[in-house]
Each structure stands twice: as C-alpha cells, then as structure tokens.
Amino acid sequence: MGIRADYVTRPREWIASILAREPRFLSAAQIHQGLERDGARVSLSTVYRTLDRLQAKGDITARPDADGEVTYMLCEPTRHHHHAICRSCGRVEDVDCAAMEQFAESLRARNGFELDGHAIEFFGKCGACR
Amino acid sequence: MGIRADYVTRPREWIASILAREPRFLSAAQIHQGLERDGARVSLSTVYRTLDRLQAKGDITARPDADGEVTYMLCEPTRHHHHAICRSCGRVEDVDCAAMEQFAESLRARNGFELDGHAIEFFGKCGACR
DNA sequence: CCTCATTTGCGAACTATTCGCAAAAATCCC
DNA sequence: GGGATTTTTGCGAATAGTTCGCAAATGAGG
Ligand SMILES: [Zn+2]
Ligand SMILES: [Zn+2]
Ligand SMILES: [Zn+2]
Ligand SMILES: [Zn+2]
C-alpha cells in the first residue's frame, strides 16, 4: 500500500542549486549557510536529509574532510574517476585517469593482495589560484 | 622554569602496545576496548590524549573512516607511501610506490593544476583473507 | 479547493571528541 | 626509600556534528 513518492520541493531545489554551482566539497553546515545567504530558509535537518537522499540516488559524493566532518559534492560516484583538489580554494576537478587504472591493475598480483578498488586524490593549486 | 618532560607511563605503554600489534586503523573506542580486553584500565580521555601525542610525534597516522570517525595506525607519515587495506579484515600493508610517484609527477603540468601531493589507497583482500 | 501522503522544522537525543580540575603517578634529589 | 615537584590520569561536564520523533506545512492529484 505504501506508494512511492518523490516530491519536488523548494528546499530540495535550493539545496541542489547550491551544489550545482559549487565545484567543491561542502559540509552540511556550509550548505546551510549558503542557503541563508541566498535568503532561503531551510532547516539543517532538511539539509542533512536531502544530502542523504541525493547520496542514495547516486547524485553526490560524500567524503569526510581531514577533521572527520563529512562533506558533499555533486559528482557521480558511479563513473569511476578521481579528484584534483585545490589546497587554496578547494575547487575540485575530475581526473579521469586510464593510466592510473592500468597501474592499479598491474599491482593486482603483488603482495598476495587481490586488488579490487582504489581511491586517489590529488592536491595542489588550481589554475585560478596560481 | 617550566621544564619539558616526557613521562613513561603504563597507559602510554599499553596503548602503544595495542597499536604495535594491530596492523590496521583503529578508532579511539576500539583501542579503548582492546585495553579493557587486556585488563588495562585506561580512560577514553587518556586514549585520545595519547593518540594526539603520538600523532604530534609523527609515530602514527590518523584518518577518518567512511563515517567520519577518526582512526589511527602505527605508521610513519613522514616516509611517503600508500596503503593497501583489506576489505575483509582491515589489515593494512604499506605500498611503497615509485611508479605512482612518477605518474603523479607526470600530471603536474596538466589541467593548469600544479600538483603538490596526492593520497592513494588500495582496497582488496589480503593474503590471509583470500 | 480538498484530500492524503510526503516533507519540513523544531527541539531533544546521540555520538565522537575535548576540557577543567582534583587526585594519582612518574621523576628527581637526598 | 621518602618527599618535593611536575606531569599525567580519570572523571564528569561541555562541545560539535549528526540523527530522530512528531506535529504542522507543503506538494500531488483529483
Ligand atoms: Zn568527481
Ligand atoms: Zn583554487
Ligand atoms: Zn581509478
Ligand atoms: Zn584481510
């Protein structure tokens, strides 16, 4: 009897729009502040719930920053790729990296370790920040 | 007049011994549980303080797990290397990887992105778990 | 509009981590 | 070893990020 739904609501649109225009990992609190700055009143709870939703849908990637605070970014986790993160402004650029794949593949046999995945992040300064 | 000190205490020895025999990332709570299992009564505060100390000394590496809980492992962060983490038992093996370095180096010029560091983790099954 | 399922806001609850301070332990000197 | 001095510990309270429960508000559909 439970009928599925998927309402289009203001808070969800606002939150999606924040994520859409910020090419960097943002914490729930930062997104909440961004909403306030735009004059959009949304509760922090709703921010968290919406982020959980988007993550479940596979629309965003979540990752804890160095302090353990979870941050989110619009980025399809299904399409395997890596990130280049600017140390200065936090801007994230996707790095699609076949060579890395190939390298990872070549490690598969070593150390008696059966490799089935990897996570890579590059750090540095983006073009705008140099 | 404040003279620096560096006391050798039971709690510190116990915590170091737990870390020394566990080749995987452990949370403060897990270390605390390990101590209790060994019959060593140490407060959680002391576990945190000791971990902070060890990290400041450069003896351990800290990293937030997927949920943002910080975990720690005996591992010199100064010697640049990467980790192969068993998805089954969590065992961590160091991966010293010149080829990866070289690859990272080759990316330096791309994307207008001045690369100055990278973090890599490999996942899979360790020899014992296959 | 009217109805009804879904979503939101609010405050309370939880969890991981940090802090302040008095009691306990380690070091040093005799 | 005993005692003075400094550091460390344990405890409970404080903090910060995140989750929950529930009544009120909102979106979808007729
Ligand atoms: Zn991406
Ligand atoms: Zn930048
Ligand atoms: Zn890859
Ligand atoms: Zn294993």
Image (tube, coloured by chain):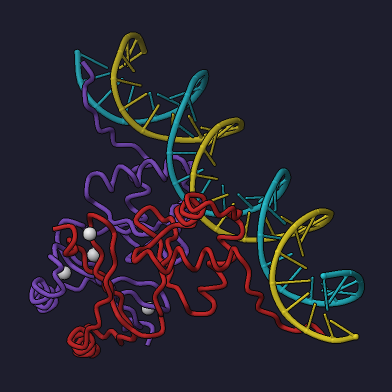
Chain colours: A purple, B red, C yellow, D cyan
- Give the percent coordinates (x, y) of residue A129: 38, 83
Residue at x-position 44% and y-position 52%: A28
Residue at x-position 31% and y-position 70%: A92
Q: Quadrant of residue B92?
A: bottom left
Q: Quadrant of residue C30?
A: bottom right
Residue B120 in view of the camera: yes
- Give the percent coordinates (x, y) of residue D27: 31, 31
Q: Give whichever of A89, D17 is nearer the camera.
A: D17
Q: Quadrant of residue A72?
A: bottom left
Tell me the quarter of the image containing the N terminus of chain B.
bottom right
Above-or-below relation of A98 to A47? below
Q: Give whichever of A121, B27 is nearer the camera.
A: B27
Asked if residue D3 lies left or right of residue A102, the reply is: right
Above-or-below relation of B25 to B60? above
Asked if residue B35 lies left or right of residue A65, the reply is: right
Tell me the quarter of the image containing the C terminus of chain B.
bottom left
Number of marks in the rendered image: 0
Residue at x-position 63% and y-position 69%: B9
- Give the percent coordinates (x, y) of residue A37: 50, 55
